[in-house]
């Protein structure tokens, strides 16, 4: 028995986003844009609104329902096609939670305690945090492995969770003498996988920042998008002609990264085009580009959210498609573990 490499399995992409409200440019360039592109790369794509993860901290029920539908609208408006990808909300596919319980018996307490996000979110009040927040990575492992997903597009801040998913898969395979779960590979790429604040290039763009000027929301209209970019913090120097010149210039690097991600270019390719320009000339170029890319998304999101019937239909269909994959995988898992009646 050896660990099962991803190459032994049908190529399949899985990723999820929490429906916590307030989608930003960071969500689009760091995730949604890439999700849309991966549809056409020859791998089955499964995308999920991870609402069970959201309730590891208390959520207002009505707001959670709204946020889940808003996130679904963001997926669709950003180009994720329900005819090409499977799109659903996590709680509608019970096999996620069922496999998570089995993984709770496989994962070790020490593994969970070492998770950076647990330390960050629980802080000094760990004893008051929910058990669900502590066990979050086991559910994330189940989200991925209940599909035998081979690739997971994630940001750098989630890479540790993929490593834990691999640990869970390896221990399960070892404990039961099988090659059942794959060693899933993280996919971390692109110029703007981590989009920074427009007001402070050292901080990640976040919906929780008190300044709305720090971020571009996917619901912003064209005038708002352009105004925020024109007012983005920069420095007085001209843009360099190569990437090395962006060192110690976080705001400049952030705006160039955003431009590169919008145009599917490398940073060096962008700087070959705009090197030597002052920000007074570069910002309008970036603003026009951002408006052209993002305005259709905000318009389509507004249309979908005006009548959520279409969203609900898409999610229900996606959940049924997802269960065609998860039910047999969970059934086989139960048989391996020795659960009667699987």
Image (tube, grey):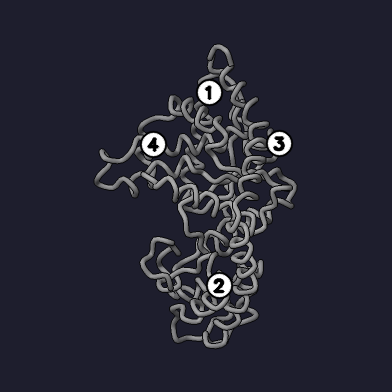
Label 3 sits on residue: 10
Q: Which residue is mark 2?
A: 221
- Could you say whether the residue bearing mark 2 is in a helix, strand or loop? loop
Distance between the alpha carbons at the discs numbered 4 and 1: 26 Å
Q: Residue at x 62, y 38 (%)?
A: 319
Of the two numbered discs 2 and 3 on the same chain, state the one appearing first in sequence: 3
**Can you say whether 295 is above or below 340 in the image?**
below
Q: Position of residue 139 (x, y in %)?
A: 48, 35
Frontmost residue, 164 versus 219: 219
Circle 1/circle 2 CB separation < 8 Å: no
The residue that appears at 37% across and 44% down in the rendered structure is 57
Q: Is residue 18 above or below residue 1?
A: below
Relative image position of residue 279 (x, y in whole percent):
52, 85
Taking the spot 44% from the left edge, 86% from the top edge, the residue there is 236
Q: Name the spot of residue 122 as percent of width and height, x first.
A: 31, 45
Kindly report the distance in space between the C-alpha atoms of the residues bearing marks 2 and 4: 37 Å
Q: Quadrant of residue 292?
A: bottom right
* Foreground residue among 105 and 290: 290
Of tags 4 and 3, which is closer to the observer?
4
- Left or right: 110 as drawn, with respect to 42: left
Q: Are marks 4 and 3 in contact (CB under 8 Å)?
A: no
Which percent across, then down, holds residue 129? 30, 40
Which residue is the site of mark 1?
Answer: 174
Q: Does the CB distance between marks 2 and 4 fall below 8 Å?
A: no
Q: Earlier in the sequence, mark 1 or mark 3?
A: 3
Q: CA distance from mark 2 to mark 3?
A: 41 Å
Q: Viewer-proximal residue, 69 or 237?
A: 69
Q: Are marks 2 and 3 in contact (CB under 8 Å)?
A: no
Which quadrant holds the N terminus? top right
- Tag nearer the camera, 2 or 3: 2
The residue labelled by disc 4 is 132
């Amino acid at each position: 028995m050896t660990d099962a490499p991803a190459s032994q399995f049908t190529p399949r992409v899985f990723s999820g986003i929490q429906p916590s409200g307030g989608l930003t440019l960071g969500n689009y360039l760091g995730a949604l844009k890439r999700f849309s592109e991966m549809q056409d790369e020859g791998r089955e794509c499964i995308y999920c609104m991870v609402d069970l993860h959201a309730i590891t901290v208390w959520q207002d029920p009505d707001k959670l329902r709204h946020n889940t539908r808003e996130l679904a609208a963001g997926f669709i408006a950003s180009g994720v096609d329900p005819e090409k990808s499977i799109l659903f909300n996590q709680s509608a596919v019970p096999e996620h939670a069922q496999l998570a319980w089995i993984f709770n018996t496989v994962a070790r307490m020490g593994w969970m305690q070492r998770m950076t996000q647990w330390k960050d979110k629980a802080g000094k009040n760990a004893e008051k945090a929910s058990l669900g927040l502590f066990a979050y990575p086991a559910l994330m492992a189940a989200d991925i492995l209940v599909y035998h997903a081979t690739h997971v597009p994630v940001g750098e801040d989630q890479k540790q969770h993929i490593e834990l998913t691999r640990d869970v898969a390896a221990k399960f395979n070892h404990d039961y003498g099988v090659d059942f779960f794959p060693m899933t590979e993280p996919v971390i790429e692109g110029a703007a996988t981590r989009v920074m604040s427009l007001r402070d290039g050292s901080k990640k763009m976040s919906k929780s920042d008190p300044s709305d000027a720090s971020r571009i929301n996917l619901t912003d209209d064209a005038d708002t998008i352009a105004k925020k970019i024109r007012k983005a913090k920069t420095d007085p120097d001209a843009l360099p002609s190569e990437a090395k010149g962006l060192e110690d210039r976080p705001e400049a690097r952030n705006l160039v990264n955003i431009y590169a991600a919008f145009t599917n270019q490398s940073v060096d390719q962008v700087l070959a085009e705009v090197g030597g320009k002052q920000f007074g000339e570069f910002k309008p170029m970036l603003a026009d580009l951002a408006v052209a890319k993002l305005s259709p998304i905000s318009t389509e999101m507004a249309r979908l959210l005006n009548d959520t019937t279409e969203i609900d239909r898409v999610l229900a269909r996606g959940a049924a498609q997802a269960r065609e994959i998860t039910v047999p995988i969970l059934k086989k898992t139960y048989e391996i573990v020795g659960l009667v009646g699987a």
